[in-house]
Image: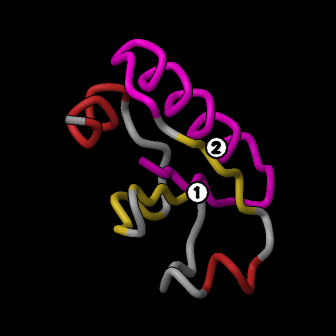
Amino acid sequence: MKIHVMGPGCPKCAEAEKTVREAVAEAGVDAEIVKVTDFQEIAQFGVFSTPAVAVDGEVKVVGKAPSKKDVLAWLK
């Protein structure tokens, strides 16, 4: 599983990354977490508002940090 956390490094983006890392650790899932800060790379996902999170290439949330509950549901 590959999870992309997208954002330039704003507080909400940091919150999104922290939540994803906590959820992955809690779920015990083998996942690679990639922080994407390059706007051109982010745009390739069709994302124009950050933070955003994609799981295995599928964008799950845009424009807000996800809740841990949401991330855990995506990991199943």
Could you classify mark 1 by the number of other residues whose Cα lies within 10 Å: few (under 14), some (14-19), or many (20 or more)? many
**Front position in the image: 65 or 35:** 35
Secondary structure state at the residue bearing disc 1: loop
Q: Which residue is mark 2?
A: 12
Q: Residue at x 19, y 35 (%)?
A: 76
**Front position in the image: 42 or 50:** 42
Q: Left or right: where does residue 46 sit relative to residue 6?
A: left
Q: Residue at x 38, y 67 (%)?
A: 59
Q: Residue at x 79, y 60 (%)?
A: 8
**Front position in the image: 12 or 54:** 54
Amino acid found under the numbered disc labelled 1: Pro
N-terminal of the pair, mark 2 or mark 1, is: 2
Q: Which residue is mark 1?
A: 51
| Magenta extent | 1-30
Q: Are marks 2 and 1 in contact (CB under 8 Å)?
A: yes
Q: Is residue 33 highlighted in magenta?
A: no
Say the numbered circle drawn on residue 41. none
